[in-house]
Amino acid sequence: MTPRVTPGATAGPPVLVVQNGPDGGPGRFGARLAEEGLSPEVWHAYDAPHGPPPGRAHRALVVLGGGHLPDGDEGAPWLPRTRELVRDALDRQAPVFGICLGGQLLAHVAGGTVRGEHGPPEVGSTGLTLRAEAAEDPLFHGLPERVTAIENHVDAITALPPGAVWLAESAGCPHQAFRLGGSAWGVQFHPEATEAQVARWPAERLRRLGFDPAEVRDRTRREAPVAAPVWDTVARRFAAVVHAA
């Protein structure tokens, strides 16, 4: 099956975005990249699980979240090709940004470890603390030491790859953000998510994980005006890294 790719809306340098499910999408993060003159092209990997990834050369790679482990190939047979894309980008020192599953996959490829259903679930707006190392990071420098971000995970990175720079943590999940080398980042949270997306999350799943759906929606709405501009800044800084690559 031929892979389905949604072309970018601008003529700027192409950024390949790997989407791992029909309810995902680059959201705010992709919109900020486009505003900064990049052209995010979305590979709907789940649509052609046995097809090859797009063959066009891309300036950078963004891997989105999904309900799989980074080596969960039986349920997501496109993951081996996604891991190859990440390895190739790391080898070329091309910019990479991994979100949730994407961040876990980056850690896995580079020698870290990820465990399924590890630690307390994190859902909705969640408090993060930036570590001292973030002060020197190209994307995270100067951000508030304490900020919230939208989370939606039950799996977690349990050990960062060798040489990774640990950037952010939360009370329930230590490895919230990290950098490999000078141009690859992984985050556990969802800088691309919007209040509207959170409002559509299935209430039954939230209750099963121990969360009140109304409180998840309300807290996200209350805290988004402060948090969203912070993660927009990270997206714009990533765009600058891509332009400079």
Image: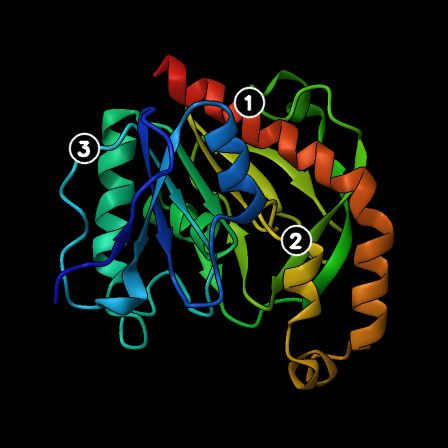
Tell me the residue at 59%/34% (across/down). Answer: 166
**Residue 194, numbered label:** 2
Color scheme of the displayed model = rainbow
Neighbours of disc 2 within 10 Å: few (<14), some (14-19), many (20+):
some
Q: Amino acid at mark 3?
A: Ala
Q: Amino acid at mark 2?
A: Thr
Quadrant of residue 133 within the rendered picture: top right
Please report contact status of discs 1 and 2: CB closer than 8 Å, yes or no: no
Number of marks? 3
**Which residue lies under the disc numbered 3?**
57
91 w.r.t. 214: above or below: above
152 w.r.t. 30: above or below: below
Q: Earlier in the sequence, mark 3 or mark 1?
A: 3
Neighbours of disc 3 within 10 Å: few (<14), some (14-19), many (20+):
few
Tell me the residue at 71%/33% (across/down). Answer: 230
The image position of residue 109, as x and y in percent, is 33, 47
Give the structural element (helix, strand or loop) at label 3: loop
The image position of residue 228, as x and y in percent, is 72, 40
**Residue 237, numbered label:** 1
Depth check, front residue: 107 or 38: 38
Q: Amino acid at mark 1?
A: Arg
Please report contact status of discs 3 and 2: CB closer than 8 Å, yes or no: no
Residue at the extreme top:
244
The image position of residue 181, as x and y in percent, is 41, 24
